Amino acid sequence: MARANGRPGSAGWTPPVADQAAGLRALLAGVSGPGPSPPAAEEAAGTAPAGLARVMAITSGKGGVGKTSLAVNLALALQQMGTKVALVDADMGMANVDILMGLVPERHLGDLVEGRCTLDEAICAGPEGVVVLPGASGLWELASIRGEPLQRLLQEIRRLDRLVDLVLVDTGAGIGEQVLTMLRATPEAVLVVTPEPTSLTDAYGLVKVLARSGSLPRLHCVVNMHKSAHEATAAANRLRTVARRFLGIEITPLGSVPFDPVVSRAVLDQVPLLLRFPHSAAAGAVREIAGRLAQAPASQRSRSGGLSGTLRRMLRGWA
């Protein structure tokens, strides 16, 4: 489990302590075994058992758009609303979810994938009870895992699927093969953009590459760091229009987050925005987006076998 950095003056943020870590282990110990894996046909149809978590990727066409900060604060907002959330850092190049949460992990996703630790040892007790699986190089090693080690990994992940309601996966940015493989296997994705033309162009490029592969998640978008409501609406409409016109793909807008200088201050303090500046305009906007995600009709909540099902589809993509 992780150690936490205590920071005097970080209002609202109580660092995870030993009893919280012990409580998380106890919860995992109480989760029943994974049981039989759902058939591939069920996974493909999105009819896997309802007890498995909903999985959603947070991604972007380029870096610097606030993707990871949004992922962290969405996780907190949803947890505060009563949704049990796990946040998985799958950004293999710039894994920093733990930094934004003030955590010091002792283990990470790579250790779990390569069998150096159990799920209990890899996860961290994050603020508000969010379950955090820190990232590091290692996810790509999945491509070479087969047989008993693979089954052991999937069983561990299946325990996480049964512990939470929603798994948010913070992917890398851009159109690298790791990002594309993850997105092709994930049922839903939130595409984070800013009003800048480069951000919108790169986001469209990401959607275009995914569309060519014939495997596309249900897409949502969030416009981040806008300077006015008009600017945010114009950016979202531009992305939606070109995707619909040239690719025949619908992108559902979830809302927008205004530019707010306190976001940078929260990052410097290594305290999530919703805890450091809970009454800020940006924090309020994140809560609104989280509310839309939480209130989505059941027909729009793709499940498809939880995170373990997502990993299985990734492996089929590599085969």
Image (cartoon, rainbow, N blue to C red):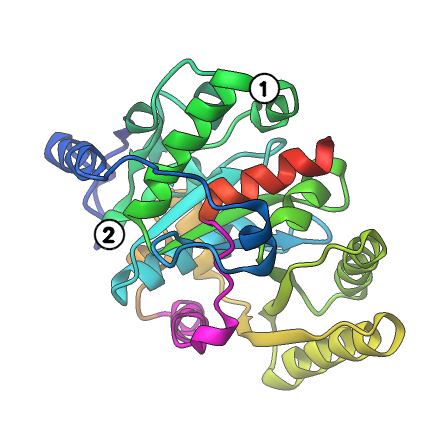
Q: Would you say 260 lies left or right of 284 here?
A: right
Which residue position holds label 2? 128
Residue 304 location, x and y as percent?
51, 54
- Residue 318: tell me if it is visible: yes
Which residue position holds label 1? 145
Q: Would you say 255 lies left or right of 156 here?
A: right
Residue 20 location, x and y as percent?
15, 37
Residue 204, picture quadrant: bottom right
Residue at the extreme bottom: 230
Q: Earlier in the sequence, mark 2 or mark 1?
A: 2
Give the residue at x 80% y 77%.
244
Q: Residue 142 versus residue 13: which sits nearer the camera?
A: 142
The residue range painted magenta reads: 280-305
Residue at the extreme right: 246
Above/below status of 314 relative to 167: above
Q: Please, what is the three-letter code of the amino acid marked with disc 2?
A: Glu
Give the residue at x 39% y 67%.
283
Q: Residue 319 versus residue 287: which sits nearer the camera?
A: 319
Above/below status of 60 relative to 98: below
